[in-house]
Image (cartoon, helix red, strand yellow):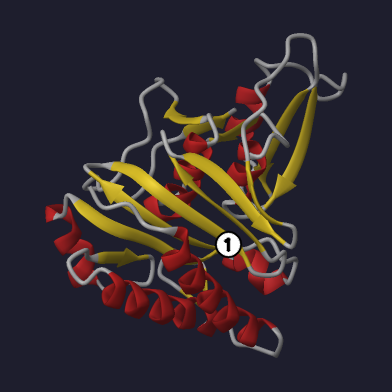
Amino acid sequence: MYLPAISELEPIARAAGEAIMAIYSQPFAVEYKQDESPLTAADQGAHEVIVQALASLTPDIPVLSEESDAGIMQARLGWSRYWLVDPLDGTKEFVSRNGEFTVNIALIEEGRPLWGLVYAPVLDKLWYGGAGLGAWRVDESGAAAIQTRPHAEGQTWKVVGSRNHLSQATLDYLARFGDMDRGEIALVSMGSSLKFCIIAEGGAELYPRLAPTCEWDTAAAQAVLEGAGGAVTQLDGEPLRYNKPDILNPWFVARA
C-alpha cells in the first residue's frame, strides 16, 4: 500500500500556498459558480500547481480536485484509490482576507481518507497524518506530534463552528451538550478545515456540521483528526465515507 512521505507532499502544498498568496497580496476579481460559491484566480492557480505535481509524483494515482472538470467528476466513480484535493478551502475567508483558508490534499483508498495534509498559508502552519499513522503539526518550531484532548466531565465544552454556515440545526444539536448562555459551551467560529485541525491538536473537542459540505472540504482534515485520535462520523455514528455518487457529504460530527 502506497503511503505519501511528508517530504514529498509538503513542498507541493507550500508551492500551492505561494500561488495563493501571490493573488492574496494584490487586488483580485471574484467570480461565482452555479452554486453561488466564490471562485478566484487563486483557486485555479493552486489547483494547477497541485494537480501537475501529483501527476508527476504518482502518475498511476488519479486526482480529483474541486476545480476538476465534469469528465473527471464522472470518471472518479470508477476509482478505488485517488488523490482528493481542495486547492483553496475557505474561499470566502480568502475574499474577506481573514487568513482562515487552507490547502487540502488527501489520499483516498476504498472510500476512506488514508492520509491527509492541511496547510494554512497565512498562518504558515501545516498538519498531516492518518488513522493508525499518527498526526503532526509543522510550524516555525518544527514538527511536533499532536493528539486530541477528549471532553472532561463537568468542564465547558470547547466547540468550533463555521464562520459562514452556523445553521439553526447546528445550534439545536449543540443544545444537547449544554447551554451557551450559562457558559456550558464555548463556541469559537472559524473558517475552512482549520476546525478539524484545532480539535486534532487538543484545542477543541467538537465540531458539528449540520450544513452542506463536499467531500473535498473534509477528507484531508478528517485523516489528520483520525491520526490524532479523533473521529468524524455521520449523525447515525457511521464513518464519513468518500467517492459516493453524490459528492455532497451528509451532516456529520467531528470530535476528539
The answer to which image quadrant residue 79 occupies is: bottom left
Whole-percent x and y of residue 167? 61, 39
160 vs 220, nearest the viewer: 220
Q: Is residue 189 above or below residue 179?
A: below
The answer to which image quadrant residue 173 occupies is: top right
Q: Is residue 150 above or below residue 95?
A: above
Asked if residue 224 lies left or right of residue 153, the reply is left
Q: Is residue 67 above or below residue 209?
A: below
Residue plotted at (44% across, 72% down): 33
Q: Quadrant location of the C terminus?
A: top right
Whole-percent x and y of residue 228? 55, 35
Residue plotted at (50% across, 66% down): 10
65 vs 145, nearest the viewer: 145
Q: Residue furthest right?
A: 182
168 vs 70, nearest the viewer: 70
Q: Residues within 10 Å of mark 1 (few under 14, many from 20)?
A: many
Residue plotted at (69% across, 66% down): 124
Residue linked to disc 1 = 119
Q: Is residue 47 visible?
A: yes
